[in-house]
Image: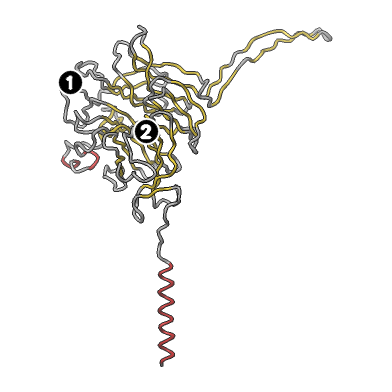
């Protein structure tokens, strides 16, 4: 009997060890990473950050899978690879926004000198990163042996491919009569038309206030300001009221967009607009509208959630949205239903012995390899984050 009890105890001990070994273990971050909450779903920072000479104002993951950064202080646009190496750069006066169409043309919201040679005004540039210009020169070739004459064409074409430094650049839009206007957001529509967030300090005009969203066709021609968003000189409390725009993000392969703005004069710092087209209506309507009783509890449209929302990014796999607030030094995350996600983080959680917390961040982007990029303007670096529980990107 005693031997049987001893064997029974060994069996129990063996079973305990087997099941204990089957538990999911928490893998600590690599030495090159910093996590703020071990064991919980949170964002882990990837070190080291990418330092830049000036202050990064906007960041874009291009359709070519390269990374573009607008450096406002140094009047530069940088082209970088996934390792953070600066491949090329281009001088552009005070760049603040970036976008890239399917032809890999890079659009930059920046500045230029007005025709009077005195004022600095806002401008939109188009940089053709992939371009072929072909010129044929006709001539005659004579074969002296056979006395044969042949007409020939001499190809004098040239091309450049992803050479940001020498690529053709063109100023496609400016408004000399309104020198205070700027273009802090550009988003590409299907078919390579685009929307532009325009802002300024004069919204007194009922017909043409500074704060508007402009629609351009794929030939860079202004078609119309969007009438679906309203600019009131005295401000407004409706979800579609705008006054101080800071950015725009268009969802991939869609005409839906998120518009960001400083909410010191408006209740809503982020507006999610959805495009509808039918026999009776063609245009944009808010996805979430707090004037509707069934949507008043949705986190995305909670009044005064933001102070200065400056940019948005989208994770198409998880269908989640990130919005960066430069005043709150934070990144706020929502799911597709507009619900707040606990993985949101800010200055406190990003502060460590290796790097201060977020300081006046302005730009944000999300890549196909599930990396979140933040243009930390105040610290003059690009910071990268990944979910602590994410073992693969699918």
Question: In the rendered image of this protein, does residue 202 appear above or below residue 242?
Answer: above
- In front of the other: 175 or 218: 175
Residue at left offset 37%, top offset 50%: 35
Residue 95 got which mark?
none
- In front of the other: 111 or 208: 111
Q: Residue farthest to the front?
A: 353
Nearer mark to the viewer, of 1 and 2? 1
Label 2: few (<14), some (14–19) or many (≥20) C-alpha neighbours in 10 Å? few
Label 1: few (<14), some (14–19) or many (≥20) C-alpha neighbours in 10 Å? some
Q: Is residue 394 visible?
A: no
Q: Position of residue 173 (x, y in %)?
A: 37, 16
* Residue 178 in the figure: left or right of residue 295: right
- In front of the other: 352 or 298: 352
Question: In the rendered image of this protein, does residue 237 appear above or below residue 295?
Answer: above
Cα gap from disc 1 to disc 2, whole angstroms: 31 Å
Residue at left offset 32%, top offset 47%: 343
Residue at left offset 26%, top offset 37%: 328
Q: Specify the quadrant of the image occupied by residue 171.
A: top left
Please name the residue that numbered disc 1 is placed on: 233
Q: Position of residue 119 (x, y in %)?
A: 33, 11
Question: In the rendered image of this protein, does residue 55 appear above or below residue 157?
Answer: below
Please name the residue that numbered disc 2 is placed on: 254
Q: Are marks 1 and 2 in contact (CB under 8 Å)?
A: no
Which element is circle 1 on? Answer: loop
Mark 1 and mark 2 lie on one chain; the one further toward the N terminus is 1
Q: Residue farthest to the right?
A: 145
């Amino acid at each position: 009997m005693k031997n049987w009890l001893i064997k029974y105890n060994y069996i129990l001990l063996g079973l305990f060890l087997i099941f204990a070994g089957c538990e999911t273990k928490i893998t600590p971050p690599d030495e090159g990473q910093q996590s703020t909450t071990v064991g919980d779903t949170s964002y882990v920072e990837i070190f080291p950050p990418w330092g830049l000479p000036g202050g990064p104002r906007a960041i874009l993951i291009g359709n070519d899978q390269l990374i573009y950064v607008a450096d406002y202080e140094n009047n530069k646009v940088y082209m970088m690879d996934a390792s953070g190496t600066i491949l090329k750069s281009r001088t552009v006066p005070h760049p603040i926004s970036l976008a890239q169409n399917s032809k890999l043309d890079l659009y930059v919201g920046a500045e230029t000198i007005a025709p009077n040679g005195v004022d600095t005004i806002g401008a939109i540039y188009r940089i053709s990163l992939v371009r072929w210009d072909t010129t044929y020169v006709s001539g005659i070739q004579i074969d002296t042996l056979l006395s044969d004459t042949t007409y020939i064409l001499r190809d004098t074409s040239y091309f450049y491919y992803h050479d940001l430094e020498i690529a053709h650049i063109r100023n496609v839009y400016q408004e000399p009569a309104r020198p205070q206007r700027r273009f802090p957001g550009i988003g590409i529509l299907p078919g390579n038309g685009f929307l532009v967030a325009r802002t300024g300090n004069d919204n007194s005009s009922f017909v043409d206030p500074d704060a508007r969203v402009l629609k351009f066709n794929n030939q860079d021609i202004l078609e119309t300001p969007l009438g679906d968003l309203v600019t009131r000189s005295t401000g407004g409390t409706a979800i579609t009221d705008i006054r101080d725009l800071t950015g725009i993000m268009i969802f991939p392969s869609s005409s839906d967009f998120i518009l960001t703005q400083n909410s010191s004069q408006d209740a809503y710092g982020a507006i999610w607009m959805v495009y509808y087209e039918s026999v009776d209506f063609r245009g944009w309507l808010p996805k979430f509208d707090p004037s509707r009783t069934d949507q008043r509890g949705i986190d995305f449209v909670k009044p005064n959630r933001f102070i200065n929302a400056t940019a948005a990014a989208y994770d198409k796999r998880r269908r989640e949205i990130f919005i960066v607030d430069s005043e709150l030094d934070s990144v706020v995350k929502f799911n597709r239903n507009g619900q707040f996600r606990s993985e949101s983080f800010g200055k406190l959680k990003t502060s460590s012995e290796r790097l201060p917390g977020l300081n006046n961040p302005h730009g944000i982007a999300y890549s196909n390899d599930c990396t979140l990029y933040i243009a930390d303007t105040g610290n003059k670096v690009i910071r990268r984050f990944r979910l602590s529980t994410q073992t693969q990107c699918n």
